Amino acid sequence: MPALGLRCGSAASRSAFPLRVSPLGVMLLTTAAFLPAAFAHEGHQTDKIPEGMTVSVDPLDTILWIHIFLQMLAFGVLFPLGMVLGIIKNRWHVPLQSLGTAIALIGYALGHLHGGRQFHPKNVHAMAATPLFFLMIGQVVMGIYLKLHLERGIHAVIRPPLRLAHSINGKAFPLYAWVQMVFGGITALGFCQGDHLGQCLAHFIMGGAFIAYGIVLTILLLVGQLWLRRTGRSQEFFDSAVIAAWGCVNTFTEHRWGTDWVKNDWQHTTMGIIWWSAGLVGIWLSKDRDGNPKRNFIPGFVILITGWAMSAHPQELMYSAMTHTMFGYTLMAAGLARIIEVAFVLRDRPTIDEHDETQTHSFQYIPVYLLYSAGFLFMSATEEQMAFMASSSMDAVAFILVLFSVAAVMFLFVMVLIHVYDRAQPRNGSARQPQAVSAAHLRDANEFELDGLVSDDEDEEHASRRKLLRHETMDEEEGSLSSPSTVGGNNNDRVA
């Protein structure tokens, strides 16, 4: 963490300009001035909240909208980007996280100073904000300590566990931020109270799981194939294992055992059964008869059949029926696209090009994006949300298109973060151009062929020809490295 930017000049300059403060220092000092007022502010009047409700009918005021915008910027954009920069050891990691922390602190203060709509003081968003605030402060403190590079004496014992804690906490911050932003939306609208809690949990957990699955597939598609190969297992093994585990949980939690079967209990419970039974089949099919990793259709099939079941759920409102039907169709399309990808596009191979794991087929992005879209559709289809939207001027088609747009923005942001990470990774020990990689493959192939044809007591002519071939291919590789790239310039010009 950088200092606040306080700089003292010479004696002469100190008399005229005693102190210089950087913009970051101004932000932190401003935040420090706001926080005491925020903590001292009672801010939880409940006199306008109707009985039995958790929020008043007043609109959100400007300060609260600024709070929402600043926290979404800090926790939703800057912290995830700063996390990636920290993973790749980029020099902008500390400034960006410092900026995010300053903005988050200002937003935290504004959250206690707003007027307009009143909220119950013991709402889930406010209760989660305090531990999140201390986790953020703890992350800053650990970052400052690690930045000092104290490694002798007692610090040799303290530094390693603090470094691990700093790393884990930083990587978990996007998850913290996601949960807190969901809590914020719930609290702002006064949803998920009383009998609606169970239904909210089901929608937000399963919808979030589909989005998380989409994020994992995006990572594996773009940068995860080498890790997957090192595990010695196919991607369907991990997918099927998670599906089976989730199915076991759903089988015993979707119905209150000992009570009457009501509403959708049968569908939810049998859906759990198909998940764990099909998941076990997927685990079995994830290896061939010799124990090698093998692709299979099971995860795609489970997604498809889940979408079909969800599209058939009975709904009381037409608005809700249209949203749930679109969610089911989207999930069915994702499952079908996943089956086509594995069976026909990849033809059971791990990647489209086994010699270059970075290559992707355009079709592979279809099931990934559809999973993002299905997740947002399901998260936005709770009973209270559907009743709220049905009473608004926006029809169901426009609402669904908005959710697909949100999914596209999320998909784009994840790919941007992966791109930032991927650009910092070396290619086979160095950032080689594609032409250089081809030349290296050609040289390796030629040397392999000569190795099989020439014996240890080869004559001088054969030895000279072999040496000349090696030098020619190496010269071609060096020439390709020195030529500028037509895509993005030489890799040497890339900022680390």
Image (tube, grey):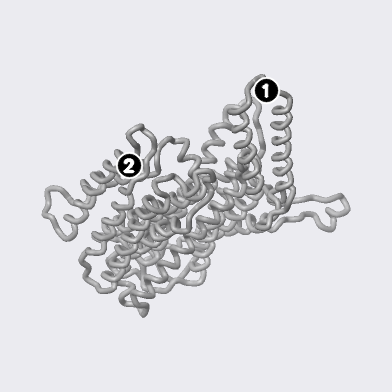
- Horizontal and vertical percent for residue 488? 67, 56
Residue 241's tag is: 2
Within-10-Å neighbours for mark 2: few <14, some 14–19, many 20+: many
- Res. 458 mark: 1
Please state which amino acid type lies under the numbered disc 2: Ala
As drawn, the residue found furthest toward the right would be: 12
- For the residues labelled 2 and 1, the Cα–Cα distance comes to 55 Å
Q: Percent x, y for residue 32? A: 60, 55
In the image, farthest residue toward the top: 457
Q: Nearer the viewer, mark 2 or mark 1?
A: 1
Q: Relative to 167, does residue 119 appear above or below in the rendering?
A: below
Q: Position of residue 100 (x, y in %)?
A: 58, 55
Tell whether 405 sits left or right of 100.
Answer: left
Q: Residues within 10 Å of mark 1 (few under 14, many from 20)?
A: few
Vertical position of residue 195 compared to residue 244: above or below: below
Residue at image x 44%, y 36%? 231
2 and 1 marks in contact (CB < 8 Å): no
Quick check: 316 above or below 373?
Answer: below
User: What amino acid type is highlighted by mark number 1?
Assistant: Glu
Please tell me the numbered disc located at residue 435: none
Q: Is residue 24 visible?
A: yes
Viewer-proximal residue, 325 or 281?
Answer: 281
